Amino acid sequence: MAQGGYGGGYDQGQGGEYQQQQYPPQAGPQMGPPGGAAPPKPSGGGKTIAIAVVILVIAAVVSAAAFIALSAAPPPPPPNGNGSGGNVTLKIGVILSQTGQLGHDGAIMVQGAKLKADEVNAAGGFKMGNKTAKIDLVIEDDGTDPNKGRVAAEKLVNVDKVQAIVGDTGSTICLSIETVTGPAKVPIVSPSCTSPKLSTKPWIFRTVGSDVFQGKAMADVALALKKAGKVGNKIALFAVANDYGLGVKDENEKRAIANGQEVIFNQQFIENQVDYDSQAAALKNAKDTNSPTEPITVLYTSYPEDAITFFGSVGKLGLTPANGYIWLGNDGIANSDVFVGNSNINTYIQNMYVTNPTSKPGDSDWGKFQAAFKAKYGAEPTAYAGTAYDALAVILAAIQKAGKYDGQAIKDALNTFTGADAFKGVSGVKDYDANGDIKGQFYQIYKVSGTTFVATGGWWEDPTKGVQDFVP
């Protein structure tokens, strides 16, 4: 996922995990002006000299006592994770959207990461070389805003001195915080940033598949709908104008053309508009011109808040399945938020299909995570709660393998989780390629029915299989 937003920030502190207090130097005796007249001799002779000696002795004793007291004081705490032997607490950063367009998803991802941290700490920590390490998550909210995400990264890197970060929620924000974390050599592991652009950033890893996979999955679902006689050969592409939307849309187009389908409409739109009447009218015109008698598949990429507004405009023009528009969405709107607010919108999106990255059905590790999450929070986890849990888990596995809490060492260890040494997470196997991308991803295909998403099959990257058990 990815998201743009408004600017913002906060005052940034300075220094590292601790700061050593500096004491002002004591003032020395006041001297007369250089080259000036000598001060007059004091009266009193030897008596005055004796008093001066006593004063100097007392001052020396006080100074010595102060020195001893300062020397006996306990030293300041060691820097983050660098104590010798014994127990240490590692500050690990988390930057996720807890407010804004992606706030609902991000807040649940935070719960997933916290669950993993709580499990590790409750078990007494984990081994890091000759130390036992516990976790202190430093959690920042980016407000679904790339600028706020970058400021949060600066704070985590420069003030908290973290050496690894779980984040971010959206691809545009991931790319923004990487401008801070990359030069600082601090790896980030994202649970939900899916844009193919991230593949060029060596300090970004993910626990979810790139939209190279999801774009293919959506186009393959459209082809399956065609083979089932639900639509014709023409498709339309509609996507939010950011890195997430562009990545999905481009892969949609490549795969659709490879599948022999014809793209009759291809447009991106700016998010957070009051309505999308003009965009809906443009889509209607494209169908009326190029496919007046046969249904088309509209591949739509956006977020819940915008989807509610968007489908309000769609409903005004009757761009519904009954009138030849079969809608296919993806992970950006595959959550219950799209059902709230306007009951008419719920009617407009009936029978819509969505793809969503998940673990493969029947995965026992996912079942255990699901039960633990529900026991802790009283609710079912989303797919991205699982990938957030895994984002922290794979960071901890890398720290343990490296034997120290150091950004470069963590990155090097993450790069070894490949092939037979791939990391097994609750959301699936994380087999990393040279770009920090996982080599495969399963996508559950859902159909909107009432106010729920009903599983109708799946897809994973396998040239001989593609869509699995999908029943349109």
Image (cartoon, grey):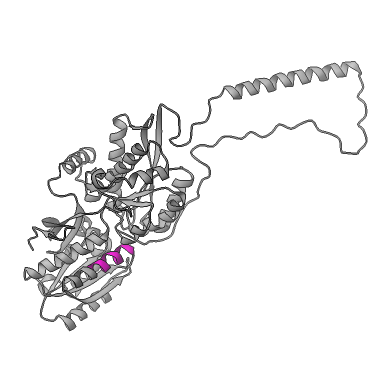
Question: Is any part of residue 287 visible from this angle?
Answer: yes
Q: Reply above or below: 122 against 298.
A: above
Q: Reply above or below: 145 against 313.
A: above
Quadrant assignment, res 470:
bottom left
Instruction: Indicate the position of residue 457 as horizontal and vertical percent values.
Output: 11, 57
Residue at (18% x, 83% y) in the render: 289
Instruction: Indicate the position of residue 369 as horizontal and vertical percent values.
Output: 20, 41
Instruction: Indicate the position of residue 187 as horizontal and vertical percent values.
Output: 39, 48
Residue at (18% x, 66% y) in the render: 219
Quadrant assignment, res 336:
bottom left
Between 61 and 431, the one nearer to me in the picture: 431
Q: Residue furthest front?
A: 420
Quadrant assignment, res 199:
bottom left
Which residues fall within the magenta stretch? 243-252
**Residue 26 as seen in the image, left or right of residue 2:** right
Total numbered labels placed on residues in the image: 0
Quarter containing the N terminus: bottom left
In the image, residue 419 lies in the stretch drawn in magenta = no
The chief SS type of the magenta part is helix
**Residue 104 as seen in the image, left or right of residue 328:** right
Quarter containing the C terminus: bottom left
Q: Reply above or below: 305 against 162.
A: below
Q: Residue furthest bottom?
A: 289
**Residue 22 as seen in the image, left or right of residue 45:** left
Question: Is any part of residue 449 visible from this angle?
Answer: no
Instruction: Indicate the position of residue 85 as horizontal and vertical percent values.
Output: 42, 27
